[in-house]
Image (cartoon, grey):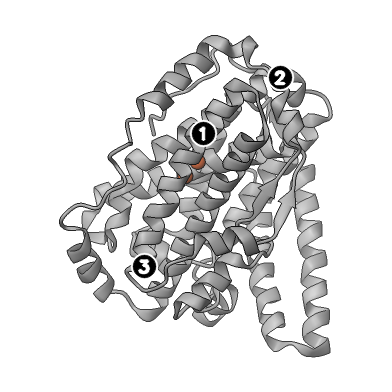
């Protein structure tokens, strides 16, 4: 798939960003592929009860309180020199993909920050408030650190404006648990896969921010653990018809990531990775971890699964080309692509899944 993607297609998908106004507009825009901001039913979160997992919960809270990353998100002396040297070697196309990566990562870090803060402000439940305070603290550091990197290119995002102007999507609490759990664990898997690759090939590290990913992703891992404990404390979330929702969210999150990553083939290539291999490495880590909480697992090695993912990425390129073309034909072509994408997703949804027993010990360690 990556080799079939021509750069002009990629450019249509990600759009160019050449100044701060465009960067801010890009962060604010909501499409099916860009990170969203969420709101939910806070009263339902207020009613959560962690007593069935109290021991593991308290231990996790101690880790949050210990805050072993409190001094991590500061630049060291070499940072600026590494930016200058690394970025000077990048082609304009690769530079564009990297900036797109920074903007979408910032948006998704900040999305977590806003959601956790809003929950905190709207509930009284001591356990959940405490958790939300810690997670918002972490996400705010993450977003701030990426924003500093964007400012080096005069592309800083105005987070206050973003918070006010971006659309919010309402999600039922259980959708928040499934989707946020997955995005935290996928965030971990993405950052650690990049970190390990560049640890093996430091000569391919074209920007110093990647050196921060190892300790950074442990925060994401712990955020995911928190949602795992919350769901395991309320087992009905993981049973019966909810298993259908879990299947839906796994596939939706995986497919979105796959399609979006295939708009950045140059960036992965520069790190010595192929978008497809990188994504399957991330799927595998995420699926392994998710056995702590999800009673079902999608079969990422099924040939139909692989074909459907490829097809979704192709359809996204075709749809972007149709959009660029515009007019009646462009509109019809886009509708056609959307229908095919829905059918392809349906095909993915109907694939058999693996069933599994949940382990008695919920928490796992970030050992990847
Ligand atoms: Fe984060
Ligand atoms: Fe996180």
Label 1 to label 2: alpha-carbon separation: 22 Å
Secondary element under disc 2, as helix, strand or loop, is: loop
Q: Residue tagged by mark 1?
A: 133
- Dot 3 or dot 1: first in sequence order is 1
Q: Position of residue 60 (x, y in %)?
A: 47, 21
Asked which quadrant contains residue 360, the reply is top right
Vertical arrangement, residue 93 with respect to residue 354, above or below: below
Measured from the top left, where is residue 354 in percent x and y? 68, 30
| Res. 5 in view | yes
Say the numbered circle drawn on residue 8.
none
Residue density around tag 3, few if under 14, some if 14–19, many if 20 or more, within 10 Å? few
- Between 217 and 352, which is closer to the camera in this rendering? 217
Q: Nearer the viewer, mark 1 or mark 2?
A: 1
Q: Position of residue 66 (x, y in %)?
A: 35, 24
| Crowd class of label 2 (few under 14; some 14 to 19; many from 20; radius 10 Å) | some
Give me the C-alpha separation between circle 3 and circle 2. Answer: 43 Å
Q: Determine the residue positioned at 45% across, 52% down.
A: 143
Between marks 3 and 2 in the image, the one whose residue lies nearer the viewer:
3
- Give whichever of discs 1 and 2 has the lower sequence position: 1
For label 1, the crowd category at 10 Å Cα-Cα, with few meaning under 14, some 14 to 19 and many 20 or more, is some
Viewer-proximal residue among 193 and 238 = 238
Residue linked to disc 2: 234
Residues tagged 3 and 2 counted as in contact (Cβ below 8 A): no
Please name the residue shown 49% across and 15% down the image: 58
Q: Is residue 267 above or below residue 88?
A: above
């Amino acid at each position: 798939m990556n080799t079939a993607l021509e750069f002009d297609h990629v450019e249509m998908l990600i759009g160019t960003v050449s100044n701060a106004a465009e960067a801010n507009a890009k962060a604010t825009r909501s499409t099916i592929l860009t990170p969203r901001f969420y709101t939910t039913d806070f009263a339902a979160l207020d009613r959560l009860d962690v007593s069935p997992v109290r021991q593991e919960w308290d231990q996790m809270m101690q880790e949050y309180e210990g805050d072993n990353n409190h001094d991590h998100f500061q630049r060291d002396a070499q940072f600026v020199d590494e930016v200058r040297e690394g970025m000077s070697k990048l082609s304009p196309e690769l530079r564009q993909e990297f900036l797109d990566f920074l903007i979408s990562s910032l948006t998704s870090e900040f999305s977590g920050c806003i959601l956790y803060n809003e929950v905190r402000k709207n509930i009284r439940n001591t356990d959940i408030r405490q958790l939300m305070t810690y997670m918002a603290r972490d996400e705010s550091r993450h977003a701030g650190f990426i924003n500093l990197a964007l400012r080096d290119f005069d592309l800083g995002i105005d987070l206050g404006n973003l918070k006010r102007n971006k659309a919010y999507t309402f999600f039922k609490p259980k959708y928040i648990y499934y989707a946020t759990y997955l995005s935290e664990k996928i965030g971990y898997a993405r950052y650690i896969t990049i970190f390990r690759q560049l640890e093996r090939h430091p000569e391919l590290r074209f920007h110093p921010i990647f050196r921060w990913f190892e300790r950074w992703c442990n925060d994401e891992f712990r955020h995911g653990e928190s949602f795992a404990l919350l769901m395991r404390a309320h087992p009905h979330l993981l049973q019966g018809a909810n298993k259908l929702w879990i299947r839906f969210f796994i596939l939706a999150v995986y497919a979105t990531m796959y399609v979006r990553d295939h708009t950045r083939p140059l960036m992965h290539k520069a790190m010595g990775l192929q978008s497809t291999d990188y994504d399957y490495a991330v799927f595998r880590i995420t699926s392994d971890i998710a056995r702590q909480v999800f009673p079902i697992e999608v079969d990422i090695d099924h040939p139909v699964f692989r074909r459907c993912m490829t097809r979704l990425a192709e359809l996204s390129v075709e749809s972007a080309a149709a959009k660029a073309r515009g007019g009646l034909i462009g509109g019809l072509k886009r509708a056609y692509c959307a229908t095919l994408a829905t059918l392809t997703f349906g095909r993915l949804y109907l694939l058999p899944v693996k069933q599994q027993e949940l382990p008695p010990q919920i928490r796992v360690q970030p050992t990847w």
